[in-house]
Amino acid sequence: MNRSFSLHLLLGFLLAGFGWAETNIPSPVLPQDTNEVTPLSLPGSEPFVYKKVGDVELRLHVVKPKGWKATDKRACLVTFFGGGWTSGTPARSITYAKWAAKFGLVGIAPDYRTRKRFDAKPEDCVADGRAAVRWIQDHAAELGIDPSKIVVQGSSAGGHVAAWTAIQDPVTPEMASDPVPNPAPMGLILLWPVTDTGTNGYGGAKRFGNDEARANNLSVTGRMPAKMPPTLVFHGTADKTVKFENSQAFTDKMKANGNSCELVVFPDAPHSPQSSKEGEKGKVVKAKIEEESLKFLEKLGLVSHEQASAGARATDKEEGE
């Protein structure tokens, strides 16, 4: 066990002793390697710098499907990693980008600034996510992508970043000149997403320097426009990190506004229920996520029935190996 991880564990015990658990603000799960390194490239993908902040270069990692050509106008799945705006890298989300490529889509896993690696705020995470999708749209011709056929996916805080790519209002007045996706994504796939950052949401003001106005300002449910893209949401009812009730409220509001939104419920499932640490249950959840996501993409006309069937067979074969 390295010294850094030991210190994190000791700090956790000390905080528990002082009643941290009683605040009901779940801490993000620490990655196994707490000294996260920003990947300059990832196997099976091509990196592109989409944004510079001072000396920091932010990259997105592009997975091209078999038979890809620059002249193509393919659909695209952009997938954001989770980690409570605190931890995580595209190494977590590249798997879904590769999954999308099996169905003929271009899969893209962008990086964004997090607190641990860049001392970033949640507002920075959102700004980076929106800038990434806009960059993809602006460079669609060289990526072989149809800019109007982009679906954005994200898990946990990455789901929050993903949802914000469909909101065109400035994150804050100071960020009014920041790039915003145009058009909005064709669809959203949100896995146990942070949609409420207010008092009843993910940590409330305590995650925003005890600034309630900041917390409410970044709430997807509070800030989203009446018209939103078709959305698919996954959430477990026993999630103690991000409340299941928040996804239910988000879905209800989406439907009340006349939008298409489906909530796939995993009874008694925790946060990140597809994780390998969940064993066989995790495999079942993962298969369900892929199955329903495939149906969603097919419904949007981004995947043909033949592509979907071929992709499903490939997934089944891998799981059986």
Image (tube, rainbow, N blue to C red):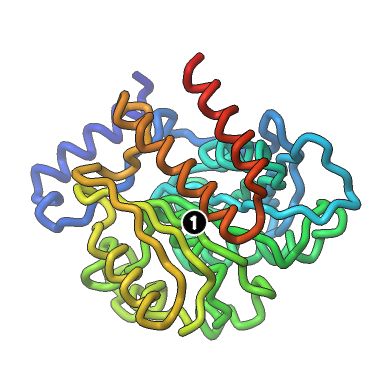
On the image, numbered disc 1 is attached to which residue? 189
Which residue shows up at 34% across the image and 77% down it? Answer: 253
User: As drawn, is 51 to the left or to the right of 198?
Assistant: right
- Residue furthest out toward the front: 305
Disc 1 residue crowd, few under 14, some 14–19, many 20+, Cα 10 Å: many
Name the quadrant containing residue 277. Answer: top left
Place of residue 30 in the rendered image (x, y in percent of width and height, measured from the top left): 35, 38
Could you say where residue 70 lies in the image, as x and y percent from the top left?
Answer: 89, 49
Asked if residue 141 lies left or right of residue 96, the reply is: right
Q: Residue at x 61, y 67 (%)?
A: 185
- Residue 113, relative to residue 134: is it above or below? above
Q: Is residue 300 something that shows in the picture?
A: yes
- Where disc 1 sits, the SS reads strand
Residue 213 in the figure: left or right of residue 87: left
Is residue 179 in view? no
Q: Measuring 69% from the left and 74% from the top, which residue is drawn there?
A: 182
Q: Quadrant of residue 251?
A: bottom left
Q: How many marks?
A: 1
Residue 101 location in percent, x, y?
68, 40
Question: Toward the viewer: 294 or 171?
Answer: 294
Name, please, the residue furthest toward the top: 321
**Residue 288 higher or lower than 319, as above or below:** below
Of the residues shown, which amino acid type is indicated by label 1? Ile
